Image (cartoon, grey):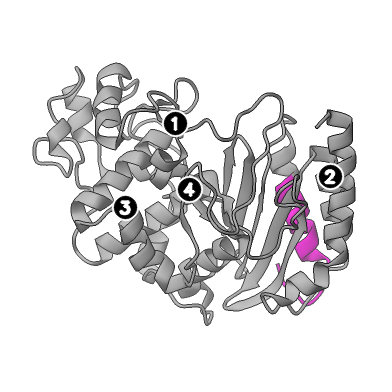
Amino acid sequence: MKSGSRRDFLKGSATLALSGLAQRMLALGSSVTPNNADAELQAYMRKYSVPGISICYQRGREVLYSAGFGVSDEVSGAPVTPASLFRIASNSKAFTAAAIFLLIQAGRLKLEDTVFSPQGILSQYANSGNQKDWLHSITVHQLLTHTCGGWSNESDDPMMEQPGFDHQRLIAWTIQTHPLVNPPGQHYAYSNFGYCVLGRVIEQVSGQPYAQFVRQSVLRVVGANDMRIATHRPAPNEVTYYGQNGEQPYKPPITRMDSHGGWIATSHDMATFLASLFAPADGSDAPALLSRESLTSMTTGSDANHGYGCGLAINRAGNAWHFGSLPGTLSLMVHTHTGYSWAAVMNTRSPIKDQASDLDRMMWRIARTDTTWQV
């Protein structure tokens, strides 16, 4: 499809899908329609050439607003609905962090436990690489807070290399070929690889495959029963992903990215996860996932970066959030200090640098148009 015809198609598809908004909202029992949601989403989709997007606002168990806009697949013209599944990319990290804290609550793990030391959780890698002092001192907490000393996404992200390697081989290869650049605990550097390692920590400590443990211990509690690890073969209700500027959404080894960026979910799944995660602080009716003590620990920054806790960015106002970004997808989930949770996810990623920040601002504007919401 030529670029001009594709843009025309997207505009027509978005308008068509928006006309069925009320029907799709009823699928999740939404009770409120913010005044400017339709116009905001249409303008955003036009600006960033977005085929389809799903958003959800929630407070406790109550779904305030949930809708799909545009198309999940350009060829069939199937609309995005609240049940549409999308790759959520790095929002997966918050689910992994929550699973780690459940193991801590159960007394099976500590934040201070070393990972790669001879007595560590993954001691099979203790003799790998040439920086054994630094390697042996890396803790679970440092992996959670991206302060392990290396393996940054800024260049040569190991998770995007050696696509034929499984997790175990990739970890051994990365330790050998990607030296740490700072002493652990002293420097913040966002790391997909660190969360890949945390997935293997969960497997070692729980005795279960990573996805199985998260499904049983996290997703079942919050009610996100359709979430699963992505594959290159689409799941039922999963959207089609569209690359821009030459990106190839189906090229990355998405299944291997499980614990740092591999989950697919609905926007409602993400919002309801945050509602349950923060239930102890909100005093809401959502099923509490963690204890208040664990939640406080998870949402406390490190000495190296006060603005990032464990799997979530945080600020002094008490808000928490995370973005996810991969070729073919962009996602966001937010929890406010006033007890609201919301999420948005789409099936493309634009090369325009403001796309993520514009998404965040738009979601806040939509929330603030309803005077009954105290965001």
Q: Mark 4 points at which residue?
A: 230
What is the number of callouts on the image? 4
Quarter holding the N terminus is top right
Secondary structure under the numbered disc 4 in the rendered image: loop
Q: Is residue 223 left or right of residue 45?
A: left
Asked if the residue at tag 2 contacts the one at tag 4, i.e. Cβ–Cβ closer than 8 Å, the answer is no
Query: Gap in Å between the C-alphas at discs 1 and 2?
Result: 37 Å
In the rendered structure, find residue 10 and report the number of the disc placed on it: 2
Asked if the residue at tag 3 contacts the one at tag 1, i.e. Cβ–Cβ closer than 8 Å, the answer is no
Does the magenta segment cover residue 361? yes
Residue at 33% over, 34% down = 148
Q: Which of 333 and 165 is in front in this view?
A: 165
N-terminal-most mark, 1 or 3: 1
N-terminal-most mark, 4 or 2: 2
Label 2 amino acid? Leu
The region drawn magenta spans 359-375
Which of labels 1 and 3 is toward the front? Answer: 3
The answer to which quarter of the image holds residue 167 is top left
Q: Residue furthest left?
A: 119
Q: Which of 122 and 315 is in front in this view?
A: 122
Which of labels 1 and 4 is toward the front? Answer: 4
Query: Gap in Å between the C-alphas at discs 1 and 4?
Result: 26 Å
Q: In this view, does 46 lie to the left or right of 261?
A: right
Which of labels 4 and 3 is toward the front? Answer: 4
Q: Mark 3 points at which residue?
A: 210
Asked if the residue at tag 3 contacts the one at tag 4, i.e. Cβ–Cβ closer than 8 Å, the answer is no
N-terminal-most mark, 1 or 2: 2
Label 4 amino acid? Ala
Q: Which of 61 and 209 is in front in this view?
A: 209
